[in-house]
Amino acid sequence: MNKADSERIATILEKKGYKEAKNIEAADLVVVNMCSVRQPAVDRVYGLIEKLKGKKKTILTGCILKRDRIKFAKSFDRILKFGDLFKLKPIRQNGLIAYVPISNGCNNACTYCAVPYTRGRLICRSHKEVVGEVKEAVKNGFREIWLLGQNVNDYQSPADSRINFARLLKSASNLPGDFIIHFTSPHPKDFTDELIDVMAGSKKIKKYLNLPVQSGDNKILKAMNRPYTVEKYKKLVKKIRKEMPNINLSTDVIVGFPGETKKQFENTAKLFRELKFNIAYISKFSPRPGTSAAKLKNNVPYQEKQRRWRILNDIILNKNRA
């Protein structure tokens, strides 16, 4: 999503007469597209500040929490909020992958997540715009199409309320041409049988799925405001694998969420061993200012979070070695 946004920011600048510099040292204008969703990304911006000194103009934009905007105010000439970037048609460089946003923002309220505070509520693009952008990208030689949204399967076309994500995906995959469609990221609570059928029935839809679980313990899921249980998640995975036996399944998970006990973490480790994910994006909990979880006591020490991270990572590595 950040790459898609950067592509559209570059398009705005190019239309104003700017040309891409070879590196940051050669640039007159530097635009930093930042993401406050995770602390390490914020820390990387701090690391850039020295390099930016002496530049004619520096702009900070992106998914920025209010606290981070205040902290960086003196380090950048301007801090800009995103406009309707995702509706802008980008000027793409020749390449293999085209990123096509289908929505922006999110109507969920996961207690750890900054997205509703940085991007706002869900806004969807017209299915005609999305399919048109995919068609043009394929025409221009792009062979991998990524449909993007904070929660893609919460999609509903503003041009036709009958067009949900499954039907949008089907329309895009039915376009002529030699290409593969990926999408990210869906929410387990909205994953329908219709979507499974569309995925299974098209050779153009990549048999890869990122299905964030976030925790393998029901009490922690409830504390995260993830409205499904471990049992429902496992039932969904079983159904997906039945229809697509060769699917590559990845997940997102957070270790060290406030109050997570060792026993609750073991439930997550148990789920990892049982479901045998191909890939896992494992995050150590860091409180995002303004979110509900930031008000909770961050009572799992960093060393323990690191230990839990290693355990899950080892399960994935061992699975892939087998």
Image (cartoon, rainbow, N blue to C red):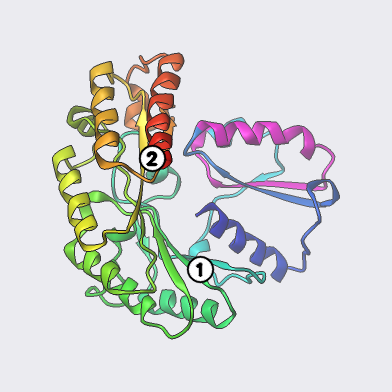
Disc 1 element: strand
Q: Residue at x 21, y 30 (%)?
A: 217
Q: Is residue 103 visible?
A: no
For label 2, the SS is loop
Label drawn at residue 144: 1
Residue at 42 percent of width and 63 percent of height: 182
Give the labeled residue for mark 2.
322
Which residue occupies 42% across, 69% down? 181
Quadrant (top left, top right, bottom left, bottom right) of the C terminus: top left
Q: Is residue 49 magenta?
A: yes
Q: Residue lying furthest front in this view? A: 322
Magenta-span inclusion, residue 62: yes
Q: Is residue 280 left or right of residue 47?
A: left
Q: Is residue 11 above or below residue 80?
A: below
Q: Going 73% across and 34% down the picture, which residue do you hit?
A: 49
Q: Which amino acid type corresponds to the residue marked 2 in the rendered image? A: Ala
The picture places residue 138, in percent across and down from the top left corner, at 52, 79
**12 or 91: which is nearer to us?**
91
Q: CA distance from mark 2 to mark 1?
A: 29 Å
Q: Which residues are magenta?
A: 39-67
Which of these two is toward me, 174 or 24?
Answer: 174
Q: Are marks 2 and 1 in contact (CB under 8 Å)?
A: no
Q: x, y percentage for residue 50?
A: 77, 32
Q: Residues within 10 Å of mark 1 (few under 14, many from 20)?
A: many
